[in-house]
Image: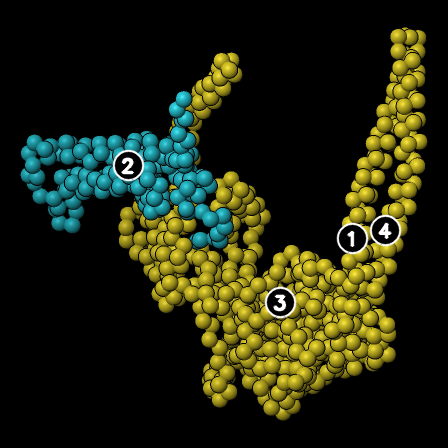
Amino acid sequence: MAAQASDRPTFPVTASDLELLRCFEPVVYYTQGEQFFPTDVEHYVRDCSLWEHYPDGHDELLVKQGELDLDKLVESRPAAFGSVRYLRFVEPLSLAETAQVLAAQARLRRRLRNYFHAGIGRLARGGFLPRLADGLFSLSFLLRGKVSAATAAAAELDYNEALKEDPKYVYYGRVARQNGWTILQYWFFFSFNSWRSGFHGVNDHESDWEMVNVYLYEQDGQLVPEWVGYASHDFKGDDLRRRWDDRGELDLEDGHPVVNAGAGSHASYFRRGEYQAEVTLPLPGWVSGPMRSWNKFWTETLGQPAANPFRIPFVDYARGDGLAIGPGKAATWSPAMIEETTPWVSRYRGLWGLFARDPISGENAPAGPMYNRDGSPRGAWYDPLGFAGLDKVPPPPKALTLLDHNCKKVIHRQEELEKLIPEKADELQALGVRLKGMEGNPHLAKQHAALEKAINQLAEEVKGLRRERSENSALLQGLTQQLGRVKAGGQDDPRAHIRHLAEPVRGDRTFRNEHAAETWAAISLSLMLFAIAALVFFPVRFTWAGLAIIIILFVVADSVLRGAFIQTIGQITLILAMLATLILLFHFGKWILAAGLVIMGISLMVQRLRELTG
Amino acid sequence: MAKRRKSYRRKSPIAVTVIAAAIVVLFLIRLYQVFEPLFRQQVFKDGISGPLTAGLRLTPLGSALLSSITYLVLSAAGIVVLIGFLRLRRWSWVLLMAWTGVSLVISLMAYFYSHPNYAVMASDVIIAFALNITEVQRIFKIRSGNGGPSF
């Protein structure tokens, strides 16, 4: 066993898949106030009805609630192109039922004492313009399909009933073997994602699938953990994985990786804390193109910090102060194995919850572990290595062989070059002498031109070979150093592969006027709308100026509370100055051009006269 | 031979001189704007001889007085800012930027609704862009090199 792996838990390769999964199963910490925990699909499906949404907009009930089970779910049912098959966990509610479930939800939370306190809200963390965009985002739900608050409440009640009947927490385990790696996949199914309704997040949807991967390699008949990859918002590839020995990023409890789940979103994080997630409003090309150019000018030319007013800040609370599930905890896992032959995994390509007809999909339920919402295969399933950027990384024992092989290959090529370069260089010199001999003989002009061409080609070749030798020398140095390091049992920086590190925002961060900032964040947008409404009573010709002044005043007031006054006042003045510049250019373009040329002329003249006079 | 004493005084960038010059220009223009309406209303000759308001509206005399007072405040602020600016005080950068912002709002309002003053507008533009120069901001300890979006 390699030295660096000596302090890691290992497991014999002969162990069964279930034993392997149990050996490395994670400990998941949830946030206080979380309403849904990993559950089993069988019970969930029994509580659902099955539907088909057709391209013409109508929906057809395929199997009624109470009649559906996993066998019926996977029955073959031909469907037209463009149709969407989906489950429905909560049936449509009447007005009276809506009131009943909302009241019952409040009673349940009181009974369980399961409350969530946001602390410094996301709106106070962001600026005024993102808050304005957030208002637009909220209004967009009037046009987009969404999951109602009553649906979320009914789902919470149903889930709690199910948990009371059968109190178990389930993960679906899968073991995949690719390119020398053994990958343990832990899939978690939730009956609802309540990020928006429960935790001021981006979306709600029926059902939720989350996943954690543990990557093992084989050495001396033992499987050794090397990497862990968690599914998370806003990150992909290399940024999703951490090395087993990276103690600053990956916590272990008795050899089990620790996961901190986002409240309501269930996204997985390595460290406890509150993560700022951002959602960018989908903009048409004619807006986003000029926006990009403006941002480039704003940041590169004017040196201002990048700002996108169409990016809305949301907070994913992964505080880890709620229920903990895993080995050694009060709540433990009930594992279930899945693979491609598991019928509900491979033969049901539909959504696992309500199809809310949301065109940007945030409120539509996800598909199963093996598929995307459109029924295409899910990358995390068929390419678990690529999911965490490990497709290019060999397991450590193989890395040594590959490094050695690479070194030998480069050394061999260097030896070849050492022979080849002098030969070619001699040949080039001989041709050069011949070319020189042709000079002064007009009758050899044709041959001279041909030889000159050949010489140029050969010179390029020799130059290329010398460059290759030089580059190979640097490469060999790097490879040799790496080889020495690996042989000595040393490892690279465990975070060298990470480009964007998910970092929690400072939990202890406070504003000077925290309460005022919070209150202002809550009411400022409405106050601004009231002020704009008052503009109606002023003469029409002052409307635009009034609107601009109101927005400026609100932005400045906001910046004072958030301690960003200096930066904000600078940026506002800069924008006004740009507007004034356009006006001046429009009226005095000719004069400005002439003045610019005169100044340049004087400057050049001064420089030249200085040169002249020494 | 006497050795020339080496000067350790920090050299200000040219932008600081340009800004100071622009402040002086603005001060003179604003000073003219303080007296111009008073001369127009012959206040120095006749004193405040009429009512300043008629109901909720200002009379021409009231309007002239308000205008003079506004420009007097701006001129006085200009003097304070100029002194602080030449002494490279941080607060003067902030005050000047705010002052320029207010002045630009007034200039743009004047452009869209009454008689524009292009000289003021041009001076404001020069000051705003000059204050935004990284070197100037470093001298006044405004920019530390990083910073997030502020809106």
What separation in Å lies between label 4 and label 3 (alpha carbons)?
A: 33 Å
Instruction: Name the residue tied to disc 1.
Output: A481
Q: Residues within 10 Å of mark 4 (few under 14, many from 20)?
A: many
Image colour assigned to chain B? cyan
**Residue depth check, mark 2 versus mark 1: number of the one nearer the observer:** 1
- Closer to the chain start, of discs 4 and 3, is 3
Residue annotated with mark 3: A248
Q: Secondary structure at mark 3?
A: loop
- Gap between marks 1 and 3, in whole Å? 26 Å
Q: Position of residue A322 (x, y in %)?
A: 55, 80
Element assignment for label 2: loop
Amino acid under disc 2: Ser
> Is residue B44 rendered to the left or right of residue B6?
left
Looking at the rendered structure, whether the residues under marks 2 and 1 are on a common chain is answered as no
Tell me if residue A535 comes above or below residue A360 in the rendering: above
Dot 1 or dot 3, earlier in sequence:
3
Q: Is residue B111 left or right of residue A68?
A: left
Callout 2: few (<14), some (14-19), or many (20+) C-alpha neighbours within 10 Å? Answer: few
**Chain A is which colour?**
yellow
In the image, farthest residue toward the front:
B1
Q: CA distance from mark 2 to mark 1?
A: 74 Å
Dot placed on the residue nearer the N-terminal end, 1 or 4: 4
**Is the residue under label 3 in contact with that under label 2 (CB below 8 Å)?**
no
Which callout, 1 or 3, points to the residue nearer the camera? Answer: 1
